[in-house]
Image: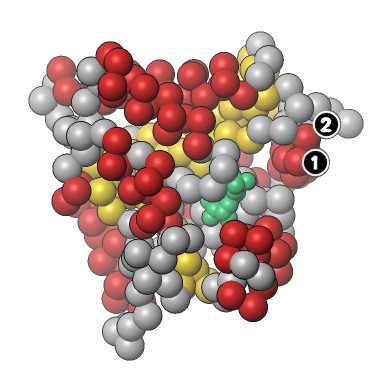
Amino acid sequence: MSSNHSEINVLEFENQSLGDRHIATEIADLLKQKQAEGKMAVLGLATGSSVLGVYKELIRMHKEEGLSFKNAITFNLDEYYPISKDHKQSYHTYMSEKLFSHVDILPENAHLPDGTKTDKNKEVLCKEYEDKIAQAGGIDLQLLGIGRNGHIGFNEPGSSIESETRLIELDSVTRNDAAPAFGGLENTPTHAITMGVASILRAKKIILMAWSTNKASIISKVIKSDPTSDIPATFLKTVANVTFVLDKEAASEIGK
Ligand code: GLP
């Protein structure tokens, strides 16, 4: 079922696995189309539980159908700070375990913000990340999950529409959601490096996915609200080519 809420195109699926398959197929089609043109496909990737099914389906397509990632350049949205790359909960570890080590992407083409503690100027490091995205030709397809407070990447409430890749202090909702994985709030990072709202909005196409009743309330709020930094995901309404892919539970409060 497809419908339009404000500027956002909403695709609602009977269950998550149908949604996962739809998104994975879009990614596979982009990779194949670019391959046929002899070009690289630039993917903006996300972490969290929402994207896991999509990554599983992409791995299946690689193993069973020969889908290749040799022409993929990827940029992840965010990484905790400070965190070592090999920390169990780092997004570097997540990406390696959940996708990269199972497909034929070239390691030098997979980028994530570096959350390693350093005295180097963070602004310079963040600018370098933006430059790399620009040098790759910009992001063709950006995947997003959504935080229960409406964050995209780690652009917490208060983030401006003009924000670029930067160091940000995590919201208490976000830290509490992450705490069990880190073995308690005291072990949970206080900061993260995230692509900014502006960096995300520059993508040529954006897919935000949300599954289950856990996300029903924030999805309905985003669809109802005008663009506001109180709910950063509402800024997605300011650009074309954004699709929300939802299961029926995540869509269940739309219009209420
Ligand atoms: C983290 C990530 C976000 C993600 C969000 C939701 O905060 N930085 O990019 O969208 O979690 O996570 P989940 O998909 O597990 O609900």
Label 1 vs label 2: CA separation? 6 Å
Q: Amino acid at mark 1?
A: Ser
Residue 174 placement (x, y as % from top left) = 65, 61
Q: Is residue 235 visible?
A: no
Q: Residue at x 34, y 65 (%)?
A: 85
Q: Left or right of 199: which side holds 252? A: right
Secondary structure beneath label 1: helix
Residue 121 placement (x, y as % from top left) = 32, 83
Q: Quadrant of the C terminus?
A: top right
Q: Residues within 10 Å of mark 2 (few under 14, many from 20)?
A: some
Q: Is residue 154 visible?
A: yes
Q: Amino acid at mark 2?
A: Glu
Q: Residue at x 48, y 60 (%)?
A: 89
Q: Quadrant of the N terminus?
A: top right
Image quadrant assignment for residue 246: top right
Q: Left or right of 237: which side holds 41? A: left
- Residue placed under numbered mark 2 in the picture: 253
Q: Residue at x 33, y 88 (%)?
A: 119
Q: Left or right of 254: which side holds 97? A: left
Mark 1 within 8 Å of ligand 1, using the beta carbon: no
The residue lying toward the viewer, choosing from 180 and 71, is 180
- Name the mark on residue 217: 1
